[in-house]
Amino acid sequence: MTRFEKDYKDAKDGNEIEVITKRKAEIEKLTREGKSCKNGFRRTCIAQDLTRLKAELRKIEELF
């Protein structure tokens, strides 16, 4: 089971605020890290992670 599947299940079970807060904090952290990163490859990886996390957060938020 992936982390997204676990979070999605937790959100359905009533912990949506905690899941959404945790995911938003992770997105903010990666955004800051991406802005300060000087390594182009690492910055590309961070951008891909951000895109994936934002899409997953959107799916979780659609439940409510």
Image (cartoon, grey):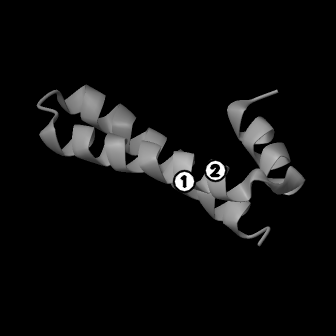
Viewport quadrant of the N terminus: top right
Callout 2: SS: helix
Residue 13 can be seen in this image:
yes
Packing grade of label 2 (10 A; few <14, some 14-19, many >=20) is: few
Drawn side of residue 62 relative to residue 26, left or right: right
3 is higher (above) or lower (below) than 34: above
Drawn side of residue 42 relative to residue 7, left or right: left
What x and y, as percent, mark residue 12? 86, 55
| Residue to which mark 1 is pinned | 21
What x and y, as percent, mark residue 14? 83, 56
| Residue to which mark 2 is pinned | 18
Check disc 2 and give the amino acid type.
Answer: Glu
Q: Nearer the viewer, residue 17 or 32?
A: 17
Viewport quadrant of the C terminus: bottom right
Seen at 65% across and 58% down, the residue is 17
What x and y, as percent, mark residue 61? 68, 66
Q: Are marks 2 and 1 in contact (CB under 8 Å)?
A: yes
